[in-house]
Amino acid sequence: MIEEIEDCARSLGVSFFGQADIRSVRSGFLLDPDTSARFDFALSLGVRLSDAVLEDIRSEPTPLYFHHYKQANYVLDRAAHLVSLRLQERGYRALPVAASQVIDWQGQRGHVSHKKIGVLAGLGWIGRNNLLVNPEAGSRLRLVSVLTDMHLEPGDRLANGCGSCRRCVLVCPAGAVKDDPGSFDHLACYEKLREFRRRGLVGQYICGVCVRACRGPISC
Ligand code: SF4
Ligand code: SF4
């Protein structure tokens, strides 16, 4: 059954597919508690971003990246929608959660943390840039989640593999990325994203500079 779901997801453009047990994190979801309680597991789906688009970025987001970001979210949301319907047809509850829909603007949070679910699914670790880092793609991917009551077998969690790499620390225009991943300066990052948006560079709070920098620890 899970192989059929994975094939379905991959046929819809998904490049990374993982299974997570979300019981340890669901109390932090910005969902109705009764809704969260219905789901013990989640699928974490990821799409690879284009290297060529990312390499066009220097110290600020570009129109090319803004369009690409929206298209990646579209691919993810469509995949999550159709995968959730496939699960529903098989008799399971399945809730697709939007790839990029901010619910708490102050805290810049969506309904769930896709990257935390990705970590629980074994797709990567939280790097110095506060993003999920995948061993193959670095942070050059985007994620979406499908919550479900279908029993899943979680992937093995990956240890932080940033090692001595500091590429994202060196390029962040806000100075938000620190050597200690736990010291990431959320406010400094958010203020820089607000500045980019205020200047009309992009229509959302995005940047892409530390996404470009992170090709994974092997190439760093
Ligand atoms: S998104 Fe931009 S401002 Fe925020 S941490 Fe990454 S490089 Fe810095
Ligand atoms: S660029 Fe290097 S230090 Fe930064 S998150 Fe990626 S692997 Fe970790």
Image: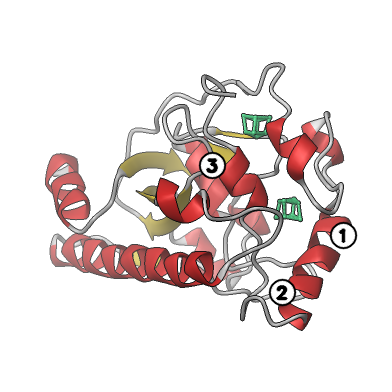
Marks 2/3: CA–CA distance: 23 Å
Q: How is the image coloured?
A: secondary structure
Q: Nearer the viewer, residue 187 or 27?
A: 187
Kindly identify which numbered label has been placed on residue 187.
1
Earlier-in-chain disc, 2 versus 3: 2
> Pointers 1 and 2 in contact (CB under 8 A)?
no
Q: Is mark 2 within 8 Å of ligand 1?
A: no
Q: Which residue is mark 2?
A: 104
Q: Is mark 3 within 8 Å of ligand 2?
A: yes
> Pointers 1 and 3 in contact (CB under 8 A)?
no
Residue 13, above or below 118: below
* Residue 41 visible to an observer of this rendering: no
Q: Residue at x 37, y 40 (%)?
A: 19
Residue 204, above or below 208: below
Estimate the x, y position of residue 187 in percent, counting from the top left. 87, 60
Earlier-in-chain disc, 1 versus 3: 3
Q: Secondary structure at mark 3?
A: loop
Estimate the x, y position of residue 80 in percent, counting from the top left. 32, 63
Q: Residue at x 66, y 46 (%)?
A: 210
Q: Quadrant of residue 132?
A: top right
Q: Residue at x 69, y 61 (%)?
A: 60
Amino acid bearing label 2: Asp
Q: Quadrant of residue 83?
A: bottom left
Estimate the x, y position of residue 120 in percent, counting from the top left. 51, 37
Quadrant where the C terminus is found in the figure: top right
Q: Nearer the viewer, residue 62 or 152?
A: 62
Amino acid bearing label 3: Ser
- Quick one: label 3, few (<14), some, or many (20+) residues within 10 Å? many
Estimate the x, y position of residue 178 in percent, counting from the top left. 84, 36
Q: Which residue is mark 3?
A: 139
Kindly identify which numbered label has been placed on residue 74.
none
Q: Is residue 173 left or right of residue 136?
A: right
